[in-house]
Image (cartoon, rainbow, N blue to C red):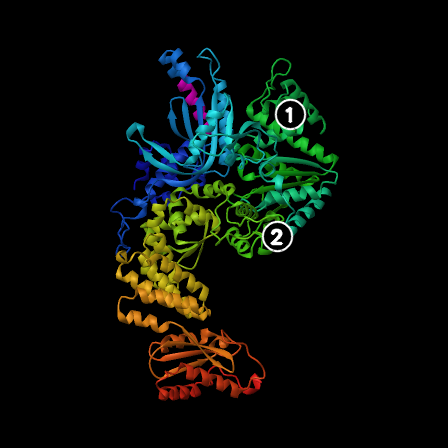
């Protein structure tokens, strides 16, 4: 492909020399990420998005480019690769906004159409600007109404917060529009969050749009109708994701048209005062620090060094949710009673390009700004703040006021100088303020979420790190590992990478999240396996499980009891956006992640290739992207690479986006690929292939593998697993007799026989007989029916000295084989032999006294008495008309006495 021509067609030919100078060829192009484009110098967000969309389009194979090497087609499944067949639509956890211009109908009657057109155009521009600022997606303009998605096509970890901020910005922007209508304009905004299907192309030509299906958009529209002019109203599902970022007014339960039960609604009054994301989202329900004693000890050690005048910097690095901010909070709590200053800087994803935004917000908090303060009062507070750190000159407060956007006029004119001179002076003031305060007492400086640090702030903090080497200051910075680690060239900087918690610490977190309630061990194990030591995941999944409808209703008591089988835990709403954001950042590779998620937590490269139909180079690039982003990890050596998702919840999130129809297609392809490429799995783990065929809506193929899995589990004496697999197999094959194909009837017949054998092993002879009788009724031939009939346990009894002695007959024929007391010695030991012998011989199993269904044993009980009991059973079992048969049976009994018989010393 000619990359230069490709760039020209995109209207981005200014990057031609950059791509050429950096050796970007076709293979490299397909693996480029947003971060790579920034490194290449593509600073425009719009250009990066245009390039990434075009790269994603290149990543999809076109018809005829890929050989179909997937083997013979599976019935009922299209043979075209899913990359061409998979639907564009996805299942998503979406925050939907509906905004409406108040009084537009009355305006359209009163105004000239051309004037109304100008008003609507200005309104649309104001809405679009606010939505773009927070990276939402305008799905539809409906005259005076606007439908906006947050969370599609690009997810962020804070979509509800972004939607509310955008809603407040829209209200403010519309109120600032010119009064062309003769009165101030206003808008109403409704916001709701929930599951939807989004992305279907509806309509044609200019009317084409990406539709959304689900209750969430309807709820957002109804909430907008509840809102007063100039108000933003949100749903309960949105409120739960906001933490304490905003001040809300509870409107109480509202009757929503089309919904039976009243729903809570909340009006957003404005942004609340919160120092940072952890403070807003997690601080309210934080518990004791668990499993981080060593990390806290290191921070306290660095604090002691800093207090002595040897300034220190600690970089706390770890993935989202690992507990970086929680450790910082623990450090603050430990130092609460020590004389010290604390300064907190908090970065935001919404202000990564806003120069010195963390500094501005810190100064506002430190100065004690209130929203209603006049500019003159804010300037006075700023001067007092500076005065606590020393003398800075007359222009210091004015420079900071200008930075903070305070209006300066009259006697408070803005200082002169070039931008470079002002920046240098500003940096000098900020560093001098920090130094002046540290001379009075030691200082703890916290920089949270440095991965969102704007470039100007990054420059300031690099100078700060250099300056504090000889000051009593400890700077603790939290950041994620997917950005370059700063300042490691300084000797007083310590990098502390946080690992996941161990299972004991995770168990403690689960118990803390559960409070006084006690969870069953199976639930605790499910949470541990899905969360894998990430504290945020542990806490949120535990809360979600407790709130789910899987528990029995009990009056009092702290022990929770499951109402039925434990379903796979659903991804909590609080984690949906964060997990999807990780996937959406890798748009070209996301489809590979979805296919891999259908295979399972662990997957092989060649199976993915067979299912996806991607060329080898393209697939390798996509897998490389996923590895580099930390979503999957690779092991093994070429060409047999195996991969696994690093987080079970990331795998779940990728899978959850697929429509049911897409899942079915992929699962069927996976089953076929495993059959062809991994025959050892099909033989040794047939339940895996069965799972994919069943999820692929091919129950007959799934039943074949479930039958094989049941046989295998039975041979390994894994009775519970065998019963579960065979019962599922029965559910797949049981259907009206006229509708069942002969293979399905044969599988059902075989299932019933094996389940009968397994019930016998478990001493459930009545249950075993029920299975055998069903198999007998299902038999197509006399041989099928006779086989089932010979397996039935026919209970009989003999009486000797008033004691009831129970025995069972199986099969028919000569000679008679007797098993004595198999219950005591474990029927599983005799069952395989019994299954074979009963088809050719008459077999008797005996419950001796004190075992099974026979009467209790009364001591002393000698071997001679035991022999007499057996004699009575043989006589009872022998046909009355044939004493010769009884004699032969007694001889058989004597020859079989050693099977299940104790010596006399043990019995007396």
Tell which residue pokes out farthest to the left in this image.
64
- On screen, residue 239 versus residue 607, left or right, reads right
| Residue 282 spot, x, y in % from top left | 59, 40
Instruction: State whether the magenta stretch is mostly helix, strand or loop.
Output: helix
Viewer-nearest residue: 270 or 255: 255
Q: Mark 2 points at which residue?
A: 508
- In the rendered image, the quadrant that contains the C terminus is bottom right
* Label 1 – label 2 distance at C-alpha: 41 Å
- On screen, residue 883 versus residue 266, left or right, reads left
Q: Which mark is residue 369?
A: 1
Occupied quadrant, residue 270: top right
Viewer-nearest residue: 741 or 203: 741
- On screen, residue 801 versus residue 436, left or right, reads left
- Crowdedness near tag 2: few (<14), some (14–19) or many (≥20) residues, C-alpha within 10 Å: few
Picture residue at 62% right of the left edge, 41% below the top: 285
Picture residue at 36% right of the left edge, 78% below the top: 837
Q: What stretch is highlighted in magenta?
A: 119-133
As for residue 227 lying within the magenta part, the answer is no
- In the rendered image, the quadrant that contains the N terminus is top left
| Residue 437 spot, x, y in % from top left | 71, 33
């Amino acid at each position: 492909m000619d990359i230069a021509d490709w760039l020209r067609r995109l209207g981005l030919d200014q990057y031609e020399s950059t791509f050429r100078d950096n050796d970007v060829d076709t293979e490299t192009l397909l693996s480029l990420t947003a971060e790579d484009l920034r490194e290449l110098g593509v600073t425009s967000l719009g250009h990066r998005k245009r390039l990434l969309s075009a790269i994603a389009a290149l990543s999809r194979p076109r018809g005829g480019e890929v050989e179909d090497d997937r083997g013979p087609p599976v019935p009922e499944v299209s043979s075209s690769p899913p990359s061409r067949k998979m639907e564009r639509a996805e299942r998503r956890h979406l925050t939907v906004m509906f905004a409406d211009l108040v009084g537009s109908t009355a305006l359209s009657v009163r105004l000239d159409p051309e004037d109304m057109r100008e008003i609507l155009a200005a309104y649309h521009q104001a809405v679009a600007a606010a939505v773009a600022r927070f990276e939402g997606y305008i799905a539809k303009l409906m005259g005076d109404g606007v439908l906006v998605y947050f969370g599609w096509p690009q997810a962020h970890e804070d979509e509800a917060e972004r939607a509310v901020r955008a809603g407040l910005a829209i209200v403010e922007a519309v109120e600032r529009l010119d009064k062309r209508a003769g009165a101030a304009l206003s808008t109403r905004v409704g916001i709701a969050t929930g599951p939807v299907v989004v992305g279907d192309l509806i309509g044609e030509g200019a009317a084409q749009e990406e539709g959304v299906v689900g209750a969430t958009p309807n709820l957002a529209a109804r909430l907008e109708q509840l809102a007063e002019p100039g108000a933003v109203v949100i749903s309960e599902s949105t409120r739960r994701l906001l933490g304490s970022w905003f001040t809300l007014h509870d409107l109480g339960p509202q009757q929503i048209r089309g919904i039976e039960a009243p729903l809570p609604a909340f009006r957003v009054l404005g942004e609340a005062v919160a120092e940072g994301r952890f403070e807003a989202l997690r601080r309210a329900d934080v518990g004791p620090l668990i499993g981080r004693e060593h990390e806290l000890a290191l921070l306290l050690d660095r604090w002691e060094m800093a207090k002595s005048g040897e300034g220190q910097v600690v970089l706390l690095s770890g993935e989202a949710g690992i507990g970086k901010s929680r450790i910082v909070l623990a450090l603050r709590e430990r130092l609460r009673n020590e004389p010290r200053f604390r300064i907190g800087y908090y970065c935001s994803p919404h202000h990564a390009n806003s120069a010195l935004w963390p500094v501005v917000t810190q100064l506002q908090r430190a100065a004690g700004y209130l929203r209603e303060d006049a500019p003159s009062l804010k300037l006075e507070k700023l001067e007092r703040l500076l005065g606590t750190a020393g003398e800075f000159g007359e222009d210091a407060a004015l420079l900071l006021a200008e930075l903070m956007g305070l209006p300066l006029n009259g006697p408070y004119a803005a200082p002169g100088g070039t931008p470079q001179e002002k920046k240098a002076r500003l940096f000098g003031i900020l560093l001098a303020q920090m130094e002046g305060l540290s001379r009075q007492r030691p200082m703890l400086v916290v920089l949270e979420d440095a991965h969102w640090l704007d470039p100007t702030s990054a420059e300031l903090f690099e100078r700060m790190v250099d300056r504090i080497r000889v000051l009593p200051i400890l700077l603790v910075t939290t950041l994620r590992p997917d950005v370059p680690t700063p300042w490691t060239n300084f000797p007083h900087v310590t990098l502390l990478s946080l690992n996941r918690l161990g299972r004991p610490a995770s168990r403690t977190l689960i118990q803390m999240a559960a409070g006084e309630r006690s969870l069953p061990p199976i639930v605790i194990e499910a949470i541990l396996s899905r969360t894998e030591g990430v504290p945020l995941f542990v806490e949120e999944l535990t809360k979600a499980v407790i709130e789910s409808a899987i528990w029995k209703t009990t009056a009092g008591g702290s022990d929770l009891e499951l109402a039925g089988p434990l379903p796979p835990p659903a991804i909590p709403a609080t984690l949906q956006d964060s997990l999807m954001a990780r996937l959406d950042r890798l748009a070209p590779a996301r489809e590979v992640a979805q296919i891999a998620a259908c295979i399972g937590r662990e997957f092989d490269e060649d199976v993915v290739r067979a299912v996806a139909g991607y060329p080898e180079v393209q697939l390798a690039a996509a897998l490389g992207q996923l590895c580099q982003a930390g979503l999957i990890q690779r092991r093994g050596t070429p060409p047999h690479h195996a991969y696994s998702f690093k987080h079970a919840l990331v795998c779940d999130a990728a899978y959850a986006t697929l429509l049911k129809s897409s899942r079915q297609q992929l699962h069927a392809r996976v089953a076929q690929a495993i059959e062809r490429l991994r025959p050892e799995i099909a033989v040794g783990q047939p339940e895996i292939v069965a799972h994919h065929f069943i999820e692929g809506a091919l129950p007959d193929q799934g039943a074949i593998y479930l039958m094989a899995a049941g046989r295998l589990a039975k041979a390994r004496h894994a009775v519970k697993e065998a019963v579960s697999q065979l019962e599922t197999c029965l559910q797949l094959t049981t259907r009206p007799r006229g509708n069942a194909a002969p293979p399905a009837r044969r599988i059902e017949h075989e299932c019933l026989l094996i389940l009968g054998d397994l019930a016998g092993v478990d001493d459930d002879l009545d249950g075993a007989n029920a299975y055998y009788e069903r198999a007998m009724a299902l038999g197509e031939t006399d041989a099928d029916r006779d086989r089932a009939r010979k397996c039935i346990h026919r209970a009989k009894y003999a009486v000797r000295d008033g004691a009831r002695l129970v025995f069972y007959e199986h099969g028919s024929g000569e000679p008679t084989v007797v098993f004595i007391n198999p219950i005591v010695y474990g029927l599983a030991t005799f069952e395989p032999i019994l299954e074979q012998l009963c088809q050719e011989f008459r077999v008797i199993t005996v419950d001796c006294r004190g075992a099974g269904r026979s009467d209790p044993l009364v001591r002393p009980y000698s071997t001679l008495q035991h022999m007499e009991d057996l004699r009575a059973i043989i006589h009872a079992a022998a046909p009355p008309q044939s004493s010769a048969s009884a004699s032969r049976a007694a001889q058989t009994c004597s020859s079989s006495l050693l099977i299940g018989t104790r010596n006399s010393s043990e019995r007396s």
